[in-house]
Image (cartoon, rainbow, N blue to C red):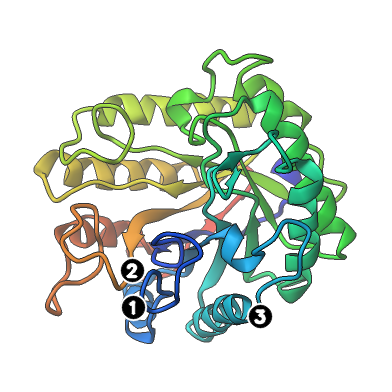
Amino acid sequence: MTSGLSAQPCLRGINAAGGEFGPLPGKHGKTHIFPSDATLDYFASKGMNVIRLPFRWERVQPQLYGELDDDELERIKDTVRRATARGMTTILDPHNYAKYAGTRMGQGRVLPPAFADFWLRFTPHFANRDDVIFLLMNEPAGISAATWLPAANAGIEAIRKAGANNLIMVPGTIWTGASHWFDDQDGGSNAEVLREIHDPQNHFIFEVHQYLDRDYSGTNTTCPRVDDAILALEGVSGWFRQHGYAGFVGEFGGSSSPDCLAGIAEMASYLNSQGDIWLGWTAWAGGDWWGDYPLSLQPKDGNDRPQMKALEPHIRTPDGRIAQCLVSE
């Protein structure tokens, strides 16, 4: 089976943003927040069965090679417990763009051994749980795939050295965009370099992002590139099939403009139709502090956002079941 995985329930859900907010080091409740019970209840009530949970590496490990911060770690553990109680899997997401305190991976002291040290310390708190997935890093950017590869492999090795059999998600560089998967880079594209990812347990999938706006950034309020975004995903799908991989779309979304609403639905429909290689998706984004953020799926004044109305028909099967993914054709 792709990446050593067997058939399992599809994961379709939401980014539960807030833990990554604010300047560092920050103060919980003032600069950043983890999802409330009400937020988790809402998305679970929509049939979602996974959250992607962003946090900052620096808050969990304030010094490279140092001890973990007990308070921030406990907030993450508490969120995982509350998600689990609602039948939701948690994807743990160091939301750092392959940087630590502003220094990019591969520079200064921010080297693969430091990244491995973080994962070696962090992993035991969540090890050997089917309902906790380790995403190595959010959107590596500003570094080449060739620079990212040794860090990614060091992180994987550390997770396995800690004795954990959890599923691992591996991003590419250039914000792990499907639209950039085959782009030329010094040392090779994501598609070329990430063939060298090594997991002793062969229990990993790739994590890809894809927005629908003019520059694929998710920062614009219209979505003129839906067709191009789907073509980009089709390209990555072909790469998966060629090499026996599987994947997950960790971020996609749009505003309430009509083209974005149609695009959100089309992307979810496409991924659902390719469930033999795509484990699922988490839309961007929910979270208690979004306010009037154009891409928010957080309910407002007790009412669903238009984006949720577009997405909801694609969360479960028509008869309300959780679909099965990674089923051999």
Residue 287 has which mark?
2
**Front label number (2 vs 1):** 2
In the image shown, does 49 or 211 lie closer to the viewer? 211
Q: Nearer the viewer, residue 193 or 5?
A: 193
Number of numbered discs overlaid on the protein picture: 3
Q: Residue at 36% x, 82% y: name it.
A: 41
Other residues around mark 3 within 10 Å, as few (<14) / some (14–19) / many (≥20): few
Please give left or right for residue 43 compared with residue 201 in the image.
left
In x, y percent, where is residue 146? 70, 24
Please tell me whether mark 2 sits on a helix, a strand or a loop: loop
**Which quadrant of the rendered structure holds the N terminus?**
top right
- Mark 1 lies on residue: 39
Amino acid type assigned to the residue bearing label 1 in the image = Thr
Kindly report which numbered mark, 3 or 2, lies closer to the viewer in this rendering: 3
Circle 3: residue type: Asp
Callout 2 touching callout 1 (CB < 8 Å): yes
Q: Nearer the viewer, mark 3 or mark 1?
A: 3
Q: CA distance from mark 3 to mark 1?
A: 24 Å
